[in-house]
Amino acid sequence: MKTSTIALEHLAALARDLWWCWQPDGPAFFADLDPAGWARTGHNPVAMLADLPPAEQTKALLPLQARFEALFASRVAYLGDHTTTWHATVGAPLAGTVAYFSAEFGLHESLPTYSGGLGILAGDHLKSASDLGVPLVAVGLLYREGYVRQELTPHGAQHSAFEPYDFDRLAVTPALTPEGKPCVVEVEIEARRVACRVFVVRVGRVPLYLLDTDVEANSAADRAITARLYGGDRTTRIQQELVLGVGGARALEALGIEPRVWHLNEGHSAFLLLERARRALVRGHATSAAQAIEAGRRGAVFTTHTPVEAGHDRFERPLVERFLPHYAEALGVTLDALMALGHWPNEHNRGADFNMTLLALHGCARQNGVAALHGEVSREMFARFYGDLPLDEVPITHVTNGVHAPTWQCAELRGLVGAHVEDAGFAERAPGDPVWSKVESFDDTTFWAWRMQSKRRLFGLVSARHVRRETRNGGHAPAPELDPTALTIGFARRFAPYKRATLLFSDLQRLEAILAAAPGPVQFLFAGKAHPADEPGKRLIEQVYRAAEASGGRVVLIEGYDMELGRALTRGVDVWLNNPRRPMEASGTSGMKAGMNGGLNLSISDGWWPEGFDGHNGWQIGEVRAFATEAEQDAADAASLYTLLEREVLPLWFERGPGGVPHAWIARAKRAIATVTPNFSTHRQVRDYVDLLYAD
């Protein structure tokens, strides 16, 4: 009995450390432990174990004992390893801790703290920091109702559903102060003090601290501040950002953590710069607000993800007058002087909005975009912030985004290629390592069999989601009959107008002619959400739905885009379609995931793709030039897309060798794996942040 009790304690500890979700046998182990519970809880092992009595857990463990012991021993070894890649390549850890702030973190579908790309990027950053041993802690918010859950009506309209989450059934636990007490901090909002509980999520070696205002001592309105990610109006947003920035800084102080570097992932947390300045004055480290802001700049890093000036977070003066006067008082400045921290230098428009990105630029010494092209766009966008500096001297660099390969690259592929190149850890090897040339000599037949297996898994998930939607809507339409042998093209991302989800359907007559002339079947899978307040984005979803209804099964729109569906799509489709209006895609990471799994990008030369495309690992849509109008740009890009499909993509796919294996296509697919995996991993990304922005 004692052994069983210890085993169950170890099982609970394993479930509450999201390390399991990127281990080769982690998800499969929990799925095999209780298949019904795994499906019912949305792949949440904490909730699954809560529903399974101890005796049943013990019984379920018996046939999985060896796998469980191996997985738990691997975690123990991982947490105790002090010879990580970080130590080996750099020689020593950073001189202090990095605090990474973000409004969202996408770690796994079982933890509803993300909406899309920004959160997934943040989650992958944490995982690689953990794998590399970088001394990093993270700070965010814990949302009682998460982000919108997309449901499609019988007519293809997006219904935004929300549901309250029981934190006891999530992989979160109360954070404790050094004295062993639950960590609770307060944030001044108007004339009241709002209490914020602090929870912690274990992400391997990295702790993620999440703040929650749903505290009994707060008013009903204050309890709802952190209810929904990006929910509510501008009043809700400024309060959320005060909790994130001010409350997050105070939480770290209460936990005894003194960061050496403060990394702001977007401007949502920029109020922490005011809190740090206030603290510097209180501690006597500065004698004026200007000195306090300047002192904080040296250890602050700001990453911008928004290549359009209008898209940056900003608040009207009346909101600042309501929510920030105590900071003007604490810093010993007028409200106008405080407002100036959110304005362009030397701007005298008293009524101008308070811009959170400009606050970040005022308060951070180091800034970066998230791709080489985005760095250029950001320097142009913010050049006037730096006065008369030449454009090439504007101090905004770039660190191109990446993705966490162990999370997104199929475990079977990693195993197959690892065995072939005789290096199980090939995916973490640095760019330029000779191991990458070996990937391209991998056996075609074996590779093709794996690709077909991944497509069948994807199609099974598509069918299950269709059945769920039909059951909810009272319909009886059969699931789409997807063909694993068909060329399968995927498009999945946030439905925002600039991403042009309907570009493919610009000229239906030409598209239909191309598909009719194809030697075999072609099918398109679409997925993605619109923000609940984005009406143009919602209309795009309806347009894709109508196109799907009229396509005779060639086009399928899948509801409920989340990390589970994202993994399946990027592992299963043959072509990843990406056609934003250049240069409005800061980076994009979904195409990286597809490339790491042998999917070929068919993409506009925007975001990361100008750095990723080498002429042999995918295709580039359109010309790299400016257009007179958006309509002209859209027409030119659509024409290029159709030409590539007709003359290059489809012919290459249907060029088959003996046994029906498309060897030329597979050569490109293997080239994609060999080029994308090392160059666009968050391991490379985190190392770049350390070298360029974290290190002294």
Image (tube, helix red, strand yellow):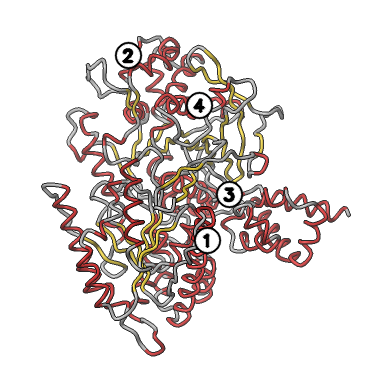
User: Circle 2 — which element?
Assistant: helix
Report the amino acid beneath label 3.
Answer: Ser
Residue 670, quarter of picture = bottom left
Would you say the residues marked 4 and 3 are in contact, meaning their CB atoms lie under 8 Å apart? no
The span from disc 1 to disc 2 (Cα, nearest Å) is 58 Å
Mark closest to the chain's N terminus, 1 or 3? 3
Question: Is 617 located above or below residue 273 in the figure?
Answer: below
Q: Which residue is mark 2?
A: 337
Question: Is 536 located above or below residue 487 in the figure?
Answer: above
Mark closest to the chain's N terminus, 2 or 3? 3
User: Circle 4 — which element?
Assistant: helix
Q: Which residue is mark 4?
A: 243
Q: Which residue is mark 1?
A: 467
The image shows a total of numbered marks equal to 4
Mark closest to the chain's N terminus, 4 or 1? 4
Graded by Cα atoms within 10 Å as few (under 14), some (14 to 19) or many (20 or more), the crowding at tag 4 reads many
* Foreground disc of the pair 2, 3: 3
Report the amino acid beneath label 4.
Answer: Val
- Give whichever of 416, 658 is nearer the camera: 658
Mark closest to the chain's N terminus, 4 or 2? 4
Would you say the residues marked 1 and 3 are in contact, meaning their CB atoms lie under 8 Å apart? no
The residue under the point 38% across, 33% down is 267
Q: Position of residue 186 (x, y in %)?
A: 57, 20
User: Circle 1 — which element?
Assistant: helix
Q: Is residue 672 visible?
A: no
The residue under the point 26% across, 17% down is 351
Q: Which quadrant: the N terminus? A: bottom right
Graded by Cα atoms within 10 Å as few (under 14), some (14 to 19) or many (20 or more), the crowding at tag 3 reads many
Q: Which mark is residue 110?
A: 3
